[in-house]
Amino acid sequence: MSDSKFLPPRSRISAGFTLIELIVVVAVAVILVAIAYPSYSDLVRTARRSEAITALGLIQQAQERYRSNNSKYASSLATLPAPRPVSPTTPGSYYTLTISDESATGYTATATAAAKRGQNKDIECTSLSVTISRGTITQEPASCWKQ
């Protein structure tokens, strides 16, 4: 007597994923990316702010060196002594730098977000400025200066 009649019929061996399983995995991945990407983008924009804050700090230091030898603060980046920002943009070109309202007692240095890689979507902080007026330093908007 043969033992084959006591063996179960051959079962089909699965060699991979079914289409349904694959669709479910892809759908879950898409949902996770849709939730995580906006948060990631916000964090990247916040991190890039440090580039503007650093550049404005360099301008402040250079302005004080300039003022120690002149009767008023410098009106442009080009007239500031080194070390200073070399160009009117930050190193990553995420912000444009300007100096305005210069006088013997103060000035305003501003970093304005550029459209490069969506930095201008940093809604509350598209423009960071530091104003020096008679020895008083004002950083605007204050919430953007917290790192």
Image (tube, grey):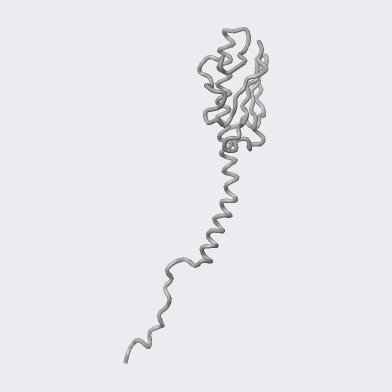
Quadrant assignment for the N terminus: bottom left
Image position of 85 (left or right of 139): left
Q: Residue at x 57, y 7 (%)?
A: 69
Q: Residue furthest left?
A: 1
In the displayed structure, 40 sits above or below 84; it is below
Number of callouts: 0
Q: Residue furthest bottom?
A: 1
Which quadrant of the structure image shows residue 93? top right
Residue 29 in the image: state x and y as whole percent: 54, 55
In the displayed structure, 56 sits above or below 31; it is above
Residue 61 in the image: state x and y as whole percent: 56, 17
Q: Which of 30/130 is in front?
A: 30
Which quadrant of the structure image shows residue 42? top right
In the displayed structure, 119 sits above or below 6; it is above
Image position of 45 (left or right of 140): left
Q: Which of 107/95 is in front?
A: 95
Q: Residue at x 58, y 14 (%)?
A: 64
Residue 17 in the image: state x and y as whole percent: 47, 66
In the displayed structure, 19 sits above or below 113; it is below
Residue 105 in the image: state x and y as whole percent: 66, 12
Which quadrant of the structure image shows residue 142? top right
Image position of 100 (left or right of 27): right
Quadrant assignment for the C terminus: top right
Q: Which of 3/120 is in front?
A: 120
